[in-house]
Image (spheres, coloured by chain):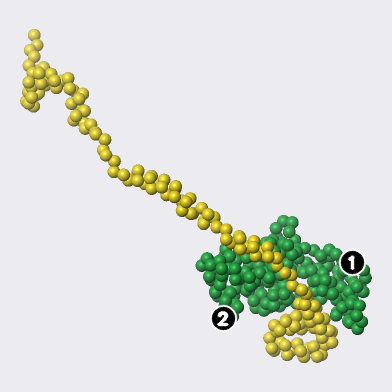
């Protein structure tokens, strides 16, 4: 039995009131949900609160789960809706990355001391993270959701389309536009500038 | 930019149908700008996917499992100890409604009339008028009276 089938079986057990089955599902998927929420709202502590909401909703809506839907799709649909509802609440927005790229001592700080590396190789994880956060905060909600599911959760376009209730062609377009935004911010990082229209 | 630009990310993600892959690869051969963009996109995907993953705290697990262990509103309110007093009160009410009541001693109309006219009856007894004919005579007494 593959993991997807096992998830579906556990979910049906949860619908029957089996809390141990829910614990197994939680342990298997909690990292993914927290990661998704983190990328979606841009804040680690809010991400944990949202992940908590996602799993509680999942538990309480287990009776509505139908085995025809892939569990992963069902889970990420709940996660996406929870994050979107959070961002629609008054005063709640995606965490903007305000610190400009130039807050490092110089653009050269992005390059490692060891010679021979291209600027791409020289980018450090924290800088990539910063550029990514800036790009994510400039994306539309659907672009951000699709990009996050694809890039960080490794989901197929078809599953993302199911989770977002969109067509595969729309998902392909959303992910491409999001990827171009990330590229733009990484290029700006290398150039030591913040691109126009960025959140920062 | 080329008509194939929209396909680049799907191509990198391995999501492009085979016939489209062939067309795109031919375009990449022909178009250096498209090829450069494809390489930059591929590098950016590699950089982003190599980022360290955030870790979850044990508090999340505790919080979620504690929350689902809490009884729901239904479970909290519809328990035997809470329902018992309501059940007892309801049973008592129903019992009172359906319990066969002993009929209060009723006064039928005939007895009531007798009671109201007890004085007359005693008088009739006194003169020993017992039959219906005697009572008729009494009722017609005025006809026997002779007017002067």
Disc 2 marks which residue? A1
Chain in green colour: A
Q: Which mark is residue B31?
A: none
* Residue at the image position 75 percent from the left and 80 percent from the top: B9
Residue A127 position (above or below residue B3): above
Q: Chain of mark 1?
A: A
Q: Position of residue A156 (x, y in %)?
A: 67, 79
Q: Nearer the viewer, residue B74 or B28?
A: B74
Give the structural element (helix, strand or loop) at label 2: loop
In which image quadrant can residue A27 be found?
bottom right
Query: Which image quarter holds the N terminus of chain A?
Result: bottom right
* Residue at the image position 84 percent from the left and 72 percent from the top: A127
Disc 1 marks which residue? A103
* Residue at the image position 57 percent from the left and 61 percent from the top: B69
Residue B141 vs residue B100: left or right?
left
Query: Which image quarter holds the C terminus of chain A?
Result: bottom right
Q: Look at chain B in the picture and name its colour.
A: yellow
Residue B112 in sight in this render: yes
């Amino acid at each position: 039995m593959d993991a997807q089938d096992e998830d579906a079986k556990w979910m049906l057990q949860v619908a029957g009131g089996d809390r141990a089955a829910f614990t197994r599902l939680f342990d298997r998927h909690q990292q993914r949900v927290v990661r998704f929420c983190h990328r979606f709202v841009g804040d680690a502590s809010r991400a944990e609160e949202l992940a908590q909401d996602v799993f509680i909703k999942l538990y309480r809506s287990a009776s509505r789960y139908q085995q025809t839907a892939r569990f992963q799709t069902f889970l990420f649909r709940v996660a996406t809706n929870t994050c979107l509802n959070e961002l629609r609440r008054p005063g709640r927005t995606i965490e903007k990355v305000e610190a400009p790229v130039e807050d490092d001592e110089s653009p050269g700080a992005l390059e490692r001391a060891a010679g021979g590396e291209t600027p791409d190789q020289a980018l450090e994880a924290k800088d990539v993270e910063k550029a990514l956060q800036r790009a994510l905060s400039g994306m539309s909600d659907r672009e951000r959701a699709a990009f996050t599911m694809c890039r960080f959760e490794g989901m197929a376009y078809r599953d993302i389309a199911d989770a977002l209730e969109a067509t595969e062609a729309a998902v392909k377009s959303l992910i491409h536009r999001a990827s171009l935004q990330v590229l733009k911010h990484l290029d700006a990082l290398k150039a030591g500038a913040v691109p126009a229209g960025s959140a920062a | 930019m080329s008509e194939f630009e929209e396909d680049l990310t799907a191509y990198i993600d391995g999501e492009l149908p085979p016939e489209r892959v062939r067309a795109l690869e031919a375009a990449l051969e022909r178009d250096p700008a498209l090829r450069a963009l494809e390489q930059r996109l591929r590098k950016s995907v590699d950089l982003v996917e190599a980022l360290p993953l955030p870790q979850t705290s044990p508090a999340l697990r505790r919080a979620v499992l504690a929350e689902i262990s809490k009884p729901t509103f239904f479970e909290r309110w519809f328990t035997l100890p809470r329902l018992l007093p309501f059940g007892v009160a309801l049973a008592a009410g129903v019992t009172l409604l359906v319990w066969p009541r002993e009929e209060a001693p009723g006064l039928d109309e005939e007895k009531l009339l007798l009671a109201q006219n007890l004085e007359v009856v005693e008088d009739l007894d006194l003169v020993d008028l017992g039959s219906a004919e005697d009572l008729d005579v009494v009722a017609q007494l005025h006809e026997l009276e002779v007017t002067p």
